[in-house]
Amino acid sequence: MKSLLQYSFILFILGFVLNSCNEEVELIGDFQETAVVYGILDQADSIHYVKINRAFIGPGNAYEIAQIPDSSYFTDVNATIKEYVNGALTRTWTLTDTLIDNKDENGVFYAPQQKMYYFHTINQSPLNPSATYKLNIDINNGELIVTGETQLVTGLSTTASSQNYTFKFADNPGSYTSSSVAVGTGNAYVVNASLDISFNEFIGASSTPKSFKWTLGESEVVPGTSKTFSANGQTFYNLIKSNITNDPLIDRRTFGSITVTITGGAEELYNYMTVNKPSSSLAQSKPTYTNLSIEGEGRVIGIFSSRQTLKFVKPFFVSAAQAYIRAIDQKSTRELCTGPITGLLYFCSNHPGDQTQTFACQ
């Protein structure tokens, strides 16, 4: 009896498989037009970009279709951004399309050129921190209407903006310290801090500037509070060492500057970033988030939000009369020129306050 049941089960499975081989599986179902919109306003910018694309589907190899530039664009797009203050319309901008060459070529889509839509406030006052901005996108003469609105991120501040702020990365030789960059969050929900470090490499009298970015961190924050980021001294010198040019002809290096960049994101942007983080669990199903709305037979994904960016350049020195202004203090400079990590890399100091030191440029 057991053998008969097993035999019947095998025949059932075999019949199912054979019948399935005769069935055509239609992978492409009813297509729903999908707008992909991404726009972030920043009052520090004078040119503002909005990415307006379409999702695509079609027969054949999807990777090949992705390499066709027009497959990701709508035929007709008419987009505006309107500025409202206390409910009253104050300015209107019509977005213009342009091609820019900044798309990552490592992806599956056509690159490096991509179409973007923009408006500018050049020769105008910048975006108003007290205003509400409303986006309206008319796609294919009313076939789809995408709308969204945002207020600006405001109130960011940092202790590094002080003229007298100096980074301190070392104390005694080989003894490293950390510098703290405190950030006032304003109305931001997420804050990022980074440093752009620059130095100069010389071959004889000819110099070449070099620079690299050092990300201190990104963190969820509570509006109206503060967040402190730490810049570790040993990390600083190791990053300098790993970013020099490997050229035996270089006979001298001098420090250039530190540019402090603080960026704060709005609540909608933070929500969008959180939802789109890679999943760390076995369950790969994830919620979707957008603050955009759509009218018509289609759907929309993406975000229209804002951020605020603060940049402060801390030069190594300004002039002999202002020798007290320096990006890194004298002990940190000595460590750069003579310490165990970077001491053999030909760094010397051209700071007016270091002229009597043994590590001064001769």
Image (cartoon, helix red, strand yellow):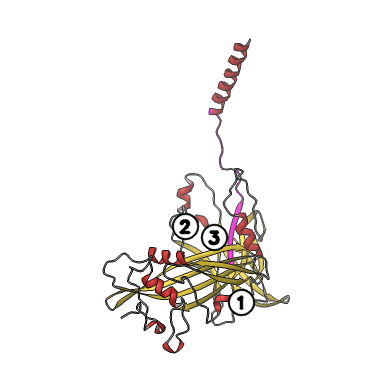
Quarter of the image that includes the C terminus: bottom left
How packed is label 2: few (under 14 Cα within 10 Å), some, or many (20 or more)? some
List the residue tagged with mark 3: 75
Residue range highlighted in magenta: 21-40
Say if residue 141 shows up in the picture.
no
Position of 107 compared to 244: left or right?
right
Q: Which of marks 2 and 3 is nearer the N terminus?
A: 2
Q: Give the labeled residue for mark 1.
A: 127
Q: In which quarter of the image is residue 305?
A: bottom right
**Outermost residue, right side:** 87
Farthest residue, direction front: 172
| Residue 336 spot, x, y in % from top left | 39, 71
Judged by depth in the image, the label closer to the viewer, 2 or 3, is 2
Q: Which amino acid does label 2 sit on?
A: Pro
**Quick one: SS at disc 1?**
loop
Q: Mark 2 falls on what kind of element?
A: helix
Which amino acid lies under the numbered mark 1 shown in the image of this protein?
Leu
Q: Position of residue 205 (x, y in %)?
A: 28, 79
Q: Position of residue 148 (x, y in %)?
A: 66, 64
The residue at the point 55 percent across, 80 percent down is 162
Instruction: Kindly indicate the quadrant of the structure image that contains residue 95.
Output: bottom right
- Are dots 2 and 3 in contact, CB under 8 Å? no
Give how far apart the Cα atoms at labels 1 and 2 are: 32 Å
Which badge, 3 or 1, is on the more N-terminal residue?
Answer: 3
Q: Residue 69, labelled with which disc? A: 2
Residue drawn at x 35%, y 69% as measured from the top left: 343
Question: For the residue carrying disc 3, how many other residues have a C-alpha within 10 Å: few (<14), some (14-19), or many (20+)?
Answer: few
Label 3: state its secondary structure.
Answer: loop
**Is residue 22 in the magenta section?**
yes
The first of marks 1 and 2 along the sequence is: 2
Q: Which marked residue is nearer to the observer: mark 1 or mark 2? A: 1
